[in-house]
Image: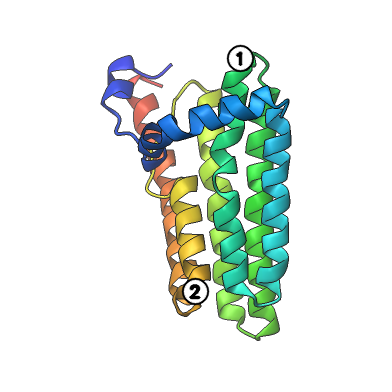
Amino acid sequence: MSDPQQTEKKPKVFTDRLRGWTGGIIKPIGSGLYRMGVHPDMVTAFGLLIVAVAAVFIGKGQLQLGGVLLLIGLPLDALDGAVARAMQRKGRFGIMLDSTLDRYADGFIFAALSYYFAVLGRFDMLLLAQAALLGSILVSYARARAEGIGVNTKIGLFTRVERVTVIIIMLLAPRLLDWGVLILAVGTNFTAMQRLWFVYNSLKNEGN
């Protein structure tokens, strides 16, 4: 396992800070949904449905509409967890479902961007969108694989919240699209390598 002292000194990612800032808002909403009989898995699935609809519009070139839909669906990423805590859910399937559907969501968004660039004949940007998708998947895979060998790896420049923020900004302001895709392609793969290096150092310090 990783060194407890090292874990305590490890800086929090922006996602952790955001949860702390919004917890007072999300928690009562989650409790309210639970009282209404809403299951957290329903919230998770509905969030993916919104992303899928947004991806259709992105692929058709209606980037701003796609960005608005993603912006509307963004709170659902936190709400499913709030509902699960309100119902005191003890099973771990919800975590697995949430993580899996997040990967589908990444795939939908970058597939839509790739299709959009392909239609325009911009194959350089298509390749960058594919690189961003690969990096996004590897960021999550690096954390999951590291936790499987006992290293808590939540560090990184481009965790999911940062990625979604860049995606929404570049869709709402299409003139920033090329820069946004480039930033995602570089940032996600850098973060994957950042996590790999962190795990290497953690295991090295333990003598492994």
Report which quarter residue 201 is drawn in. top left
Q: Quadrant of the N terminus?
A: top left
In percent of width and height, residue 180 lies at 45, 68
Q: In the shown orientation, is residue 194 left or right of residue 168?
A: left
Report which quarter residue 203 is drawn in. top left
Q: Quadrant of the C terminus?
A: top left
In percent of width and height, residue 157 lies at 37, 48
Report which quarter residue 58 is drawn in. bottom right
Q: CA distance from mark 2 to mark 1?
A: 41 Å
Label 1 element class: loop
Q: Earlier in the sequence, mark 2 or mark 1?
A: 1
Q: Which mark is residue 177?
A: 2
- In this rendered view, identify the residue nearer to me: 5 or 59: 59
In percent of width and height, residue 128 lies at 54, 69
Residue found at x 58% / y 54%? 72
In percent of width and height, residue 84 lies at 62, 23
Residue at the spot of label 1:
88
Dot 2 amino acid type = Leu
Q: Is residue 134 visible?
A: no
**Way the structure is coloured:** rainbow
Residue found at x 54% / y 60%? 132
